Amino acid sequence: MIKNNIKTIVLVGVLAIVGIVFFSTYNGLVTKEEKVEGTWSQVQNQYKRRADLVPALVKVAKSYAEQERATLTAVIEARSAATAIKLDPTNMTAEDLKKFQQAQGELSQALGKLMAISESYPDLKSNQNYLDLQAQLEGTENRISVARKNFIDATQDYNTAIRRIPTNIIASLFGFDKRPYFEEAESSANMPEIDL
């Protein structure tokens, strides 16, 4: 009788420990997954902020650089393409992320050309509205870099967790799948030369 009670107590203790480990591992994965999704929201937020600054910047530049209409149109078109891509962080694929990055890279290139145009127009470079918008855009580019780094860090933490033993068992049972990373876009590595 005492042996049966001890066996029962040991069995209940082992099951309790397994249950605690199971639930804490599952909850840890949920927390990491939510962090990936939250940091992705910040990435999108910063890209939206940049896209919101573009029309004002183009408007100011347009008043000074009417003959540069092709570049201004390219900026507007790139902005439109970049804001058209919406990604759901819960089922984002590497291909989706690559398309998003490509559209954002094209906008970055178009903005780079717009900034180069300002060098040809001294009045534009001294316009306070233009200077303020340019400073905001530069600040936003820095925020984008930070948001992307945070997303990459959260994604790495999550992807590492779902591959470790015994967490990988729980991850596979409950459908915690690997998330894609940002990769260096080819277009950002080879910035175009601008000949004005």
Image: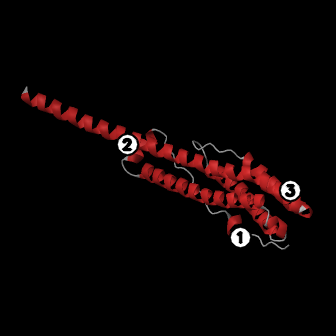
- Residue with the most extreme left position: 2
- Disc 3, SS: helix
Single out the mark in the foreground, 3 or 1. Answer: 3
Measuring 61% from the left and 60% from the top, which residue is drawn there? 142
Measuring 68% from the left and 49% from the top, which residue is drawn there? 48
Labelled disc at residue 130: none
Tell me if I can see residue 152 in this picture: yes
Labelled disc at residue 190: 1
Task: Mark 3 or mark 1: name the one nearer the start of the chain.
Answer: 3
Separation of marks 2 and 3 at Cα, in angstroms:
51 Å
Judging by the rendered image, the residue that carries numbered circle 3 is 73
- Disc 1, SS: loop
Separation of marks 3 and 1 at Cα, in angstroms:
22 Å
Viewer-nearest residue: 3 or 22:
22
Amino acid marked by disc 3: Thr
Single out the mark in the foreground, 2 or 1. Answer: 1
Judging by the rendered image, the residue that carries numbered circle 2 is 25
Viewer-nearest residue: 40 or 61:
61
Q: How many numbered badges does the structure rendering display?
A: 3
Amino acid marked by disc 2: Thr
- Residue with the most extreme right position: 67
Task: Mark 2 or mark 1: name the one nearer the start of the chain.
Answer: 2
Residue 84 as seen in the image, left or right of residue 92:
right
